Image: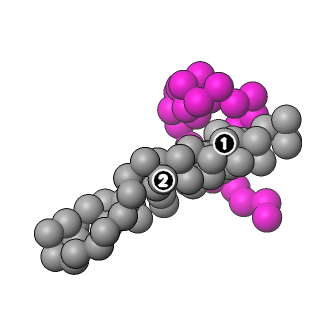
Amino acid sequence: MRTTLNLSETLIAELMKVSGVKTKTEAIHLAISEFIRQKKLAKLRSLSGKLRIDLDWRELEETELKSQKLRERAWHGGR
């Protein structure tokens, strides 16, 4: 979907630099995805102490790392 936005060139350049992506589109997609992920994690953290769930944190971390690698490959054209 094509969208016109007024964004700070400085912010976009910094985003591209710190994320290591080569295009503005990649940078925006990555930033939006990461923002959404962070908000979802914050919601989960707000439930801390309210739910009792027996989970293996190592397994969860491994799953998250695999998911992150897949997202990065998708944004880098499947490389």
Residue 68 picture location, percent across and down: 60, 46
Disc 1 residue type (three-letter):
Lys
**Which residue position is annotated with label 2?**
59
Q: Which is in the foreground here, disc 2 or disc 1?
A: 2
Residue at (75%, 28%) from the top-left corner? 22
Task: Give the Cα distance between marks 2 and 1.
Answer: 16 Å
What kind of element bears circle 1? helix
Residue at (48%, 53%) from the top-left corner? 59
Instruction: Write down the quadrant of residue 15 in the picture.
Output: top right
Q: Is residue 24 left or right of residue 55?
A: right
Q: Which residue lies furthest to the top in this view?
A: 17
For the question of whether residue 12 can be seen, the reply is yes
Where is the N terminus found, in terms of image quarters?
A: bottom right
Residue 74 picture location, percent across and down: 77, 47
Q: In this view, does 44 lie to the left or right of 18?
A: left
In the displayed structure, 40 sits above or below 25; it is: below
Disc 2 residue type (three-letter):
Glu
**Which residue position is annotated with label 1?**
69
Q: In this view, does 49 lie to the left or right of 12?
A: left
Q: Which residue lies furthest to the bottom in this view?
A: 51
Q: Is residue 4 magenta?
A: yes
Residue at (31%, 60%) from the top-left corner? 42
In the displayed structure, 23 sits above or below 5; it is: above
Residue 66 picture location, percent across and down: 63, 47
Colour mode of the rendering: one colour
Front residue (pair 56, 71): 56
Q: Which residue lies furthest to the left in this view?
A: 49
Front residue (pair 46, 6): 46
Residue 3 picture location, percent across and down: 72, 60
Q: Give the range drawn in magenta.
A: 1-25
